[in-house]
Image: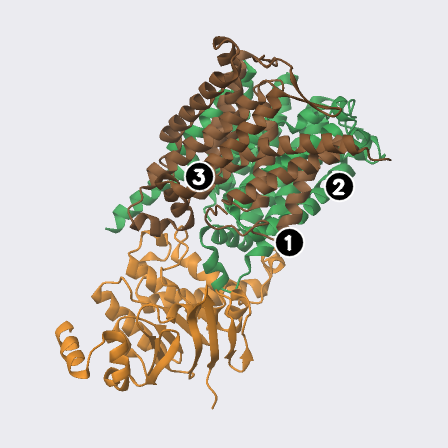
Chain colours: A green, B orange, C brown
């Protein structure tokens, strides 16, 4: 694999680490945290949708379950933030396997619908299972985490928690996507009968991709929750799912670096489009529809097409 | 010596129609066996049932002494039966190199842990696969496309890639589903030559085809199906002149068929 | 817990009414899937637009129910036509994910445009029937509910006749059953697909218009209902219209009974749990799918 994007990625990661050192604005640092966390969630969606070809709306549900699991671990069960993240990941992986197993046997149509229904169900449970989630009031006053005696109380300090988390998750996903497992997922997306004819059973791979994307998204939800300091059913607003989707689509489904670049660039978008909540959503919708007509494979896909054209011409 | 592939009394029906009505055939190791028959005779269904892509209703399939009847497709592939598809299947968005690497992946002992730690086992497996891939690519003459996305290849070239991929794991037998359908004549010669060379090196093939000349040139034995049953079996010459075969295919007498084939050549 | 017969009857009637509503939405989704193999995410918004159309048409028509209903249904049918021509016509049968994202984008645009212009304030609309209704024993059912249910039943009857006995309907069933064969006999997929979308939109518009006098109309009302319709289409078997209707009526009853005795969260969870259970046991849905069977 071409090493250049990886080098650029490492440089960018280091540059990002320096953000709280170049600005004191909590607002800007907050945007930075959003950029990091949303990029991780988008990269997880990319794993299941871009690489494996399964459009999953369940990510929103995993995001929400992750947030609540982390919050409840700390507030109700007396654990640490770090333990909460682990629970967020594990719980979501189990849930993903449970709904993935019957659904993946059916087909891609059912999969999309089941994942959507799951996400909406999680939203309703968050709102209605008041005994567990405290319903619409939510769980406020979430304490910032501490480690080795140091408390990451300020936004700037919490930024480094988010940064460390994101770099770790993205490194893991990168290793996965560039391994044989990643290559097999791509093969499954492109030509599943051929994969079977070559001795590979697609089901374990699909389940693994689904569970891993669920775990990563859940942990990301946990990190974001503690940045917000509160979790309530609004955390499951479809707006988050749309954001992850738009990042993947604009970046290019199936391109690891395309999605990462798009994640960083587009996370600033909600802030730019702050003028009216409705107009912002309308623009999101328009972007989604327009991208499907003009650039369905995103920017990475468009670049790839150009490269292929040149190659075709060279070979004639 | 028992046959490499032994199919006994294979049955398959759809909605009351007997696509396969008790077909029995066998393929000897080291041979090239042809499977022909008019449209609707059940050739493709037979291949799908043998390779696990369709569920059979009855019958037994034994590969090198092992009963593979009813196993899922990926198990049958691991048992040593590789197949190609009528509408060519390759990974169009991947390079020739990656296409062949994936074809070998399931058959080496390296696990994801080996890969992550870059163990000796992993590196050896990758090197071995790459060596075999280069050999096969040279055989099919597509060296210049090694790193190129296979999607840009011509139809005939893609069929060659599919053939090479099927051979990567050194299977016991390769089942080819219409390997030259839709391919231009010069390419057909190439494929014929490649298959003959591979067979001389020890590979066993079962070929389903419509192209009579292709089958005649290559196959040691030919099996003819008609309406879900085995109609005839023998060498290519014997089949050519078997009146039952001519009747089923063409509804003609031997003389008419001779004239027909001379006219078409 | 003593079960009061009257209470149970009330729940059952409510459940059936709810089921008919779900069925109108689910049938449209199934129809579109059967013909085009895509899922229309904006389907709930068509219902919402139908409800809004009703709220505007009623005052203009002097609160006369039937003219307003007809106007609403036709308007939404036209909307479906426009949506098809602009967004859905270029889609090929294999572009499932792309169709979802396009209709999802459309759904977002429609909801927020409506919210932008009309705000999220719920609207109530009155009809010529007001709150009058019919009494069965100690149960009271308003005319608007009765007529809504009646209109739904009539729509299903009409749909059955169309699919079974008209050229228009037969072409749809042919495409759903075997696309290649249908193309070979000269059926034009674009025309059939467009008709299916218009028909499905009209059904949704009818549902929305029927609900408008019964409950509050907001830009989000379609969203609450649509995910259940999706689940129903899966449970009944993708593309299977009678399956969707049976599943819808069943769900309406189940939800009504559960809601009458248990917490609301279980009512909502019911559809999802049923769907997962069905998928475990019968991956193709409760009824054999594959082409639109009309009985």
Query: Gap between marks 3 and 2, in whole Å?
Result: 55 Å
**Residue C161's mark?**
3
**How many numbered badges does the structure rendering display?**
3
Residue A54 visible in the current orientation? no
Q: Nearer the viewer, mark 3 or mark 2?
A: 3
Q: Quadrant of the N terminus of chain C?
A: top right
Residue visible at 37% across and 32% down in the picture: A294
**Mark toward the viewer: 2 or 1:** 1
The x and y percentages for residue C38 are 46, 40
Of A209 and C201, which appears nearest the observer?
Answer: C201
SS at badge 2: helix
Residue C281's disc is: 1
Report which residue position mark 2 lands on: A87
Q: Answer few, some or many: residues within 10 Å of disc 1's Cα (few below 14, many 20 plus, some between 14 and 19).
A: few
Image mark 2: chain: A
Question: Can you say whether B254 is above or below B228 in the image?
Answer: below
Which percent across, then down, holds residue B37?
32, 74
Please tell me which residue is depicted at 31% across the width and 58% down the height of the picture. Answer: B144
Q: Is residue A17 visible?
A: yes
**In front: label 1 or label 3:** 3
> Decide: marks 3, 2 in contact (CB < 8 A)?
no
Where disc 1 sits, the SS reads helix
Q: CA distance from mark 2 to mark 1?
A: 30 Å
Q: For residue B143, what is the image quadrant? A: bottom left
Residue C223 in the image: above or below residue A92: above
Residue C106 locus on image (x, y percent): 47, 27
Residue A264 lies in quadrant: top right
On the image, the x and y values in percent for residue B205 come to 38, 76
User: In this view of the protein, which residue sits in the foreground, C104 or B196?
Assistant: C104
Asked if badges 2 and 1 are on one and the same chain, I answer no
Q: Is residue A215 left or right of residue B248?
A: right
């Amino acid at each position: 694999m071409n090493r250049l994007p990886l080098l650029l990625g490492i440089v960018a990661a280091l540059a990002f680490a320096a953000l709280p050192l170049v600005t004191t604005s909590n607002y800007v640092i907050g945007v930075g945290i959003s950029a990091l966390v949303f990029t991780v969630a988008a990269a997880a969606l990319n794993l299941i949708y871009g690489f494996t070809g399964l459009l999953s709306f369940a990510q929103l549900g995993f995001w929400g379950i992750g947030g609540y699991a982390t919050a409840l671990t700390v507030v109700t069960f007396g654990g640490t933030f770090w333990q909460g993240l682990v629970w967020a990941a594990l719980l979501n992986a189990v849930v993903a396997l449970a709904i993935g197993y019957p659904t993946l046997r059916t087909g891609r149509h059912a999969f999309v619908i089941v994942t959507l229904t799951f996400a909406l169900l999680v939203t309703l449970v968050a709102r209605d299972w008041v005994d567990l989630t405290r319903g619409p009031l939510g769980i406020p006053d979430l304490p910032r985490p501490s480690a080795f005696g140091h408390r990451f109380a300020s936004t700037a300090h919490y930024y480094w928690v988010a940064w460390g988390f994101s770099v770790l998750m993205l490194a893991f996903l990168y290793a996965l996507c560039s391994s044989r497992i990643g290559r097999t997922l791509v093969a499954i997306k492109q030509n599943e009968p051929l994969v079977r004819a070559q001795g590979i059973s697609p089901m374990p791979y699909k389940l693994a991709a689904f569970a891993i994307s669920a775990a990563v998204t859940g942990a990301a939800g946990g990190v974001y929750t503690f940045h917000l300091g509160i979790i309530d059913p609004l955390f499951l607003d479809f707006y988050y799912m749309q954001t992850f989707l738009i990042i993947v689509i604009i970046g290019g489904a199936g391109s690891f670096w395309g999605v990462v670049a798009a994640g960083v660039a587009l996370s600033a978008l909600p802030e730019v489009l702050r003028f009216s909540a409705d107009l912002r959503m309308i623009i999101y919708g328009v972007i989604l529809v327009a991208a499907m007509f003009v650039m369905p494979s995103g920017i990475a896909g468009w670049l790839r097409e150009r490269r292929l054209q040149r190659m075709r011409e060279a070979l004639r | 010596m028992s046959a490499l592939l032994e199919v006994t009394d294979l049955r398959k029906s759809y909605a009351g129609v007997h696509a396969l009505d008790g077909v029995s055939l066998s393929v000897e190791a080291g041979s090239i066996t042809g499977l022909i028959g008019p449209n609707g005779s059940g050739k493709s269904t037979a291949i799908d049932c043998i390779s696990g892509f369709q569920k059979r209703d009855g019958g037994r399939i034994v590969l090198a002494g092992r009963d593979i009847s009813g196993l899922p497709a990926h198990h049958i592939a691991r048992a040593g039966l590789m197949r190609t598809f009528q509408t060519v299947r390759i990974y169009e968005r991947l390079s020739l190199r990656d296409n062949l690497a994936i074809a070998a992946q399931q058959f080496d002992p390296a696990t994801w842990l080996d890969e992550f730690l870059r163990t000796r086992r992993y590196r050896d497996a990758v090197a071995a696969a790459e060596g075999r891939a280069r050999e096969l690519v040279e055989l099919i003459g597509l060296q210049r496309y090694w790193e190129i996305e296979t999607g840009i290849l011509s139809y005939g070239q893609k069929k060659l890639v599919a053939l090479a991929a099927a051979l990567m794991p050194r299977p016991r037998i390769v089942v080819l589903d219409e390997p030259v359908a839709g391919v231009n004549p010069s390419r057909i010669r190439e494929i014929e030559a490649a298959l003959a060379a591979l067979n001389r090196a020890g590979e066993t093939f079962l070929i389903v085809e419509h192209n009579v000349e292709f089958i005649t040139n290559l196959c040691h034995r030919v099996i003819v199906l008609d309406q879900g049953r085995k109609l005839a079996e023998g060498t290519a010459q014997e089949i050519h002149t078997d009146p039952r075969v001519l009747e089923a295919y063409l509804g003609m007498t031997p003389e008419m068929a001779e004239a027909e084939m001379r006219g078409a050549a | 817990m003593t079960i009061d017969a009257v209470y149970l009857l009330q729940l059952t009637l409510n459940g059936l009414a709810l089921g008919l509503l779900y069925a109108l939405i689910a049938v449209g989704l199934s129809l579109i899937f059967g013909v085009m193999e895509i899922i229309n995410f904006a389907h709930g918004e068509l219902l919402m637009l139908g409800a809004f159309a009703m709220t505007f048409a009623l005052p203009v028509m002097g609160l006369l129910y039937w003219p307003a209903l007809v106007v609403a249904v036709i308007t939404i049918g036209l909307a479906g036509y426009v949506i098809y021509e602009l967004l859905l016509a270029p889609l090929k049968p294999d572009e499932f994910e792309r169709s979802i994202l396009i209709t999802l984008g459309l759904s977002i645009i429609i909801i927020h445009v409506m919210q932008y212009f009309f705000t999220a304030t719920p609207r109530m609309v009155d009809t010529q029937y007001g709150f009058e209704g019919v009494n069965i024993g100690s149960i009271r059912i308003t005319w608007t509910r009765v007529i809504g249910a009646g209109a739904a039943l009539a729509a299903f009857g009409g749909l059955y006749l169309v699919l079974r006995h008209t050229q228009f309907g037969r072409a749809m069933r042919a495409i759903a059953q075997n696309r290649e064969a249908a193309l070979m006999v000269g059926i034009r997929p674009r025309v059939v697909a467009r008709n299916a979308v218009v028909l499905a939109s009209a059904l949704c518009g009818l549902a929305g218009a029927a609900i408008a006098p019964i409950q509050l109309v907001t830009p989000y009302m379609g969203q609450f209902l649509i995910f259940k319709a999706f689940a129903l289409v899966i449970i009944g078997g993708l593309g299977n219209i009678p399956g969707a209707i049976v599943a819808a009526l069943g769900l309406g009853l189940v939800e009504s009974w559960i809601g009458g005795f248990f917490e609301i969260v279980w009512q909502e969870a019911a559809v999802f749990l049923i769907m997962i259970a069905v998928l475990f046991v019968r991956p193709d849905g409760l009824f054999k799918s594959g082409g639109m069977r009309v009985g």
